[in-house]
Amino acid sequence: MKLIKKQIPLAIVFITGVLTLISYYVPHKVSVDYIETMNKWENIVVAFAFLLGLISLFFSHYHKITRKADGWGYSIFVFIGFLAMVVPSYTSHGKQMVDGMLTPLGWSYKYIYTALSGTMFAVLAFYIVSTAYRSFRIKSAQAFVLFVAAFILILGKVPLGQIIWDYALGWTGQGVSAVIEWIMQVPAVAGKRGIMIGISIGAIVTSLKIIFGIEKQYMGKD
Amino acid sequence: MALDTSIIAGGWLAAGLTIFLFSFLYKDNPFFKIAEHLYLGAGMGWLFQVSVTSVWIPKIWEPVSKGELLVIIPSVMGLLLLTQFIPKISWLSRYGFTFMMGYGSGLAIPAGLSTDFMSQIEGTIRPFSKLASMTPFSILSSLIVAAGTICVLFYFFFSVEHKGHLKKVSNVGIYFLMIYFGAAFGNTVMARFSLLYGRFDDLFTFSGASYFYATQAILAAMVIYFVIHWLVSGRKPASEEEAA
Amino acid sequence: MKETLQKFFKIDRRWIFLLLAVTLFVPIVKPIGLPNKSISQATTRVYENIEKLPAGSFLLLSLDYDPSTRPELHPMAMALVRHAFSRNLRVGVVTYIAGSTGLIEELFAKVGKEYNKKDGTDYVILPYQPNILAVMTQMSSDMYGIYSKDRNGTPIAGMPVLKGVKSYKDMSLVVCVTGTAILDYWVAYVGDKYSVPVAGGVTAISQPGYGPYLQTNQLKGLIGGMKGAAEYESLIKQPGKGTSGIDALNLAHLLVLVLILTSNIILLFVKYF
């Protein structure tokens, strides 16, 4: 049992990992054929992965409804929202536009999905402002540096800010856009590049651990 | 210009859903909850319908019905992922996961090595090979990039033994990180506002006469709802919800 | 005095929400008339890379954004497509974000008509695919191995737009517009590996993170956020939602700065006086 529960899966990760890694460096026909097959397979396997999210969402709301838990009425709207996309897709055969006219599916996308998804993220604008007011504390030299960089970017990215800068600091002969370009191309590159190199080393080590079966948390417990 | 009825109806629906979601900023309420749950369902529904029409039908159903049976292997591996929900046989999902992990790791190693490691080191050093053609200011900038990158790396890798000169170097690294984070914060502000602008712009569109003033009508209805709710629920000061 | 200030500091945050809503909504109703003036080097590089392509070149667009980042990225994508069509380039579109399909449809319905471009002849929209790495790797040898039909189920083999296009070798430039890390994948798995020129358009949030790639020329240019969209619109001389967006953001940006300064001054005052 241990063989099919553990050793074969670990062998799969090792073999696919090593072969895929090698195929990156070996442009031979065999390796191209191998990677092409793997590409097609991977694309299909991943197309099922989202069902994990879908099923757990449905389970939890279905249970809420059957148990009449607090606020179960709202759970019905999860299913209504789902059907509001899937039913028009079926009737429109997955097409969103025919001859420049919106199909029911295109309509659902434009007026339901866009409004909901767009607004969910737009709300964050309000929180970043109130956080900026309440929690942006310039208490140390490091915080001050962060503040100066943020200040210049917030100011210099809009025309009104550029006018204010020219009015107050025009005598320096440096436009705010030039200062922003410099920040983005010099100190910010240094900061990000350090992070990037650090992360790449971490990612390579983790990938090697996965291939060699040292890191296997994703497999869950026995 | 008179609009099609379906477009006007769409405008009312979109304006309504948008205002319902925004109403949470004032106070939690049933309209927000309805819109929030619709969002969860609609997001899944969209992903589901795209997966069916773009992948399952053309990549699995059609090949299999034409007798290309090889695609059954990855489909089974994909379906095995779902055994996650049945504890007794959940180990079967490993066959799908290990395949995904192996493939992903195998690709991640060479790409990470060349793109984020070698190329970055090369990019830091390369400017110095053309010193002759550079202005003093760009030489200085290149030096700052090189020194800054090294300091940040010191901060990451020697954070355990912060002593003496090493500590100083890694402290300088922190300042470079702060500039990067400051720039990132400034840009985040712009990004968040842009998204809000997008929704407001749509609300403005729907507030026009051709949409029969959808935005104003729904906004007024929400205000009336909150006033009535306030009158009925005993006029508790609204700021009590603040803690949330 | 101190108490008044502290009260002011602990003001109900909904007043701040309201203030933001007003500062952002009013300029939409009544534009201020201060459009974007400066153009960054990174945006200009994208423009020049498209500008130098001869007519008929194949441009691959990877449009990977959904309605949640639409206000920033849609104007960008629209300006890019307008630029490509005005230069008579052939355009192919791929996507790895399910939520983007509707926006792509909307974009090409509008801009295609403006330039009188035909689906299948001048552009092709390929269907969503779930696994980006698999598709990217596959397209290096034979794109038809993954894509056999367009998003409406029409077979793509023999389409005029794809004449002579089989793999990256036959594409002049890849531009990825995204609010996710998909641009990183294009750089690492396509740009670096197969020496294909890759440029990008990203949200303002992720823009600073691409500085290193721009410096090494791993990225041939980058359009960042609403400002980048406005810059590109001015480069192609077709103002759109990016330009009007920047105008509307003017006051809100100043509001944030005023708020940060106010709260810090209050705190200083409370502490030392």
Image: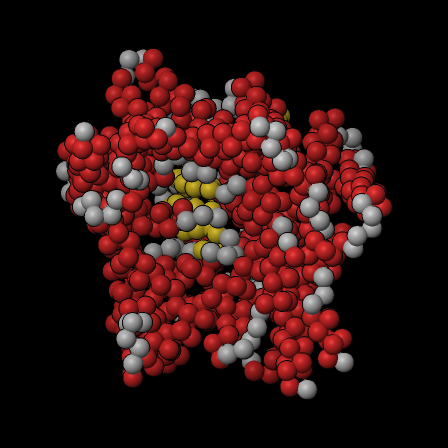
Q: Where residue C80 appears, x then y in whole percent?
A: 51, 46
Residue at 65 percent across and 39 percent down: it is B33
State the residue in front, C145 or B155: B155
Quadrant in the picture for residue B96: top left
Q: Is residue C11 left or right of residue C158?
A: right
Quadrant in the picture for residue B135: bottom left
Q: Is residue A79 left or right of residue C94?
A: right
Q: How many marks?
A: 0
State the residue in front, B113 or A67: A67
Q: Where residue B111 appears, x then y in whole percent?
A: 27, 50
Q: Where residue C240 appears, x then y in whole percent?
A: 63, 48
Residue at 69 percent across and 46 percent down: it is B28
Q: Say how the picture is coloured.
A: secondary structure
State the residue in front, A212 or B53: A212
Q: Where residue B167 appears, x then y in whole percent?
A: 32, 79
Q: Is residue A48 left or right of residue C141?
A: right
Residue at 60 percent across and 53 percent down: it is A124
